[in-house]
Image (cartoon, helix red, strand yellow):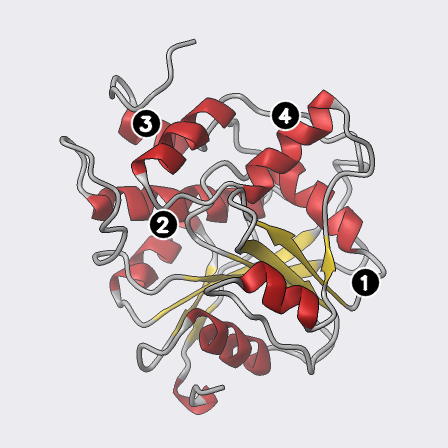
Amino acid sequence: MTGALGAFVLVTPVQASGSVALNGSVTNTEAPAGKQAAHPWTAIIPVRSLTEGKSRLEHPAIAPQALIEAFVTDVVNACLDCPQIGRTVLVSPDPSAASLTDSLGCEFFAEPAVTGINEAIVATRSALASAERVIAILGDTPCLTGPVLTAVLHRAEGQPVSFVPDAAGTGSTMWCSTDPAADPHFGHHSRARHREDGAIELGPKQPSPELLALWARARRDVDTDVDLWDACRLGTGPATTALLKDSRVMPRK
């Protein structure tokens, strides 16, 4: 793994309190809500760029860059709305991401060079206290809410390393670890790679409609127009919803 830790700059606002109202929200029935965790997690959100990427998202009226920023905004707000998360850190080599974190109220690590998602997570984690429990969350998961993350972290309790598979069934959207020596394996066929490395796959305890809907949000990342349509069907965060308002991509109720 690469990353010069001495070159990372940390900007540290206080973790925000209070809830964020999301459209189509799902109540979490797998874990108690409302109380700050005794041993909170640190969320790490790796973002390659706010201005480049998502080339497979072709919306006639909305630039991919605007969607990227909206997605990241919704992920950060979900973390800030989760009582089990005590710190939220966005890591990116893109300077414009620092301005976004200023407005959102989370921390920022300035990655000195463009490496990869896994390298960025490992380098950021190395700069944190070794005892901190971390959840790495991809920045293109706009269906996340505080209750969804609470459910994920409740299932991750007691597991040294665990992960959430993506909706396609081959990748991963989140990776949780209490083991400082563990490494994530986001990327091509990451579901198989995480399992091969001993990580426990997370999902609902019971296949009830409510829990299946909640975990569908946890698994939904957005790379294509079809993914975006499905995200809108499940319910996206306020930033993405506002951006797509009156857009044809929004499913009709």
Q: In the rendered image, which residue does mark 1 sit on?
A: 159
* Numbered circle sitting on residue 26: 4
Q: Mark 4 or mark 3, which is nearer to you?
A: 4
SS of the residue under disc 3: helix
Q: Earlier in the sequence, mark 1 or mark 4?
A: 4
Q: Determine the residue positioned at 51% across, 72% down.
A: 121
Residue type marked 3: Ala
Q: Is residue 92 above or below residue 54?
A: below
Residue type marked 2: Ser
* Numbered circle sitting on residue 103: 2
Q: Is residue 133 in sight in this rendering?
A: no
User: Circle 4: is it few (<14), some (14-19), or many (20+) Cα within 10 Å?
Assistant: many
Q: Mark 2 or mark 3, which is nearer to you?
A: 3
Q: Is residue 19 left or right of residue 74?
A: right
Q: Earlier in the sequence, mark 1 or mark 2?
A: 2
User: Circle 3: is it few (<14), some (14-19), or many (20+) Cα within 10 Å?
Assistant: few
Residue type marked 4: Val
Q: Mark 1 or mark 4, which is nearer to you?
A: 1
Q: CA distance from mark 2 to mark 3?
A: 17 Å
Q: CA distance from mark 4 to mark 2?
A: 26 Å
The quadrant holding residue 7 is: bottom left
